[in-house]
Image (tube, helix red, strand yellow):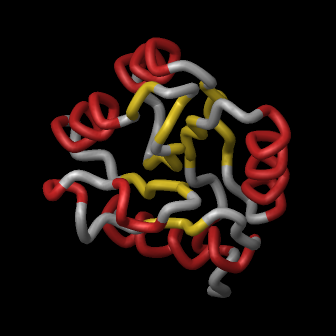
């Protein structure tokens, strides 16, 4: 089984407020064989999608138009769904409780996304 095959069918929620970045992530996920959930550009949309179920993991922009993503990170943690943060600031903008979570440093490449998704997939099983 190849690394890409391991990602086939993985349902990934995208939470990103920049349309072009969101579209790029969608394309990368599709190329990796993942199923795109969303994307959500607002926190309330993302919370609805998580509460509806049907996701394996999520890629979260840390800052949605000035609103921190942390309430969604807490909800995902409660539901046992792994996630990665996508940010231009590395883990510097994360809360202490979030340190150690996977971080995609923007801008990132498909290979970086695949690596993080394999980490998340290992948690999902």
Which image quarter holds the C terminus? Answer: bottom left
Query: Is residue 14 positioned above or below 120 on the image?
Result: above
The answer to whether 114 appears left or right of 119 in the picture is right
Instruction: Please tell me in which quadrant of the rendered image residue 19 appears.
Output: top right
Instruction: Please tell me in which quadrant of the rendered image residue 86 appears.
Output: bottom right
Give coordinates of residue 45: x percent, y percent: 52, 15
Query: Is residue 21 positioned above or below 16 on the image?
Result: below
Instruction: Please tell me in which quadrant of the rendered image residue 106 appears.
Output: bottom right
Which image quarter holds the N terminus? Answer: bottom right
Query: Is residue 17 positioned above or below 29 on the image?
Result: above
The answer to whether 67 appears left or right of 25 in the picture is left
Residue 44 vs residue 82, the one in the foreground: 44
Give coordinates of residue 36: x percent, y percent: 68, 40
Q: Which residue is depicted at the point 85% across and 40% down?
A: 20
The answer to whether 100 appears left or right of 22 in the picture is left
Give coordinates of residue 72: x percent, y percent: 33, 31
Q: Which residue is depicted at the point 46% across and 67% down?
A: 90
Q: Which residue is depicted at the point 79% across and 59% down?
A: 28
Identity of the residue furthest to the bottom in this view: 2
């Amino acid at each position: 089984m190849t690394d890409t095959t391991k990602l086939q069918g993985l349902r990934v929620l995208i939470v990103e407020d920049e349309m072009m970045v969101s579209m790029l992530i969608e394309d990368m996920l599709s190329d990796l064989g993942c199923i795109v959930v969303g994307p959500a550009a607002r926190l309330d949309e993302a919370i609805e999608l998580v509460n509806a179920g049907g996701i394996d993991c999520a890629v979260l922009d840390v800052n949605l138009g000035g609103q921190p993503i942390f309430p969604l990170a807490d909800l995902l943690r409660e539901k046992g769904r792994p996630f990665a943060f996508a940010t231009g600031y590395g883990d510097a903008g994360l809360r202490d409780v979030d340190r150690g979570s996977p971080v995609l440093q923007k801008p990132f490449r498909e290979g970086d996304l695949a690596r993080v998704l394999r980490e998340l997939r290992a948690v999902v099983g």
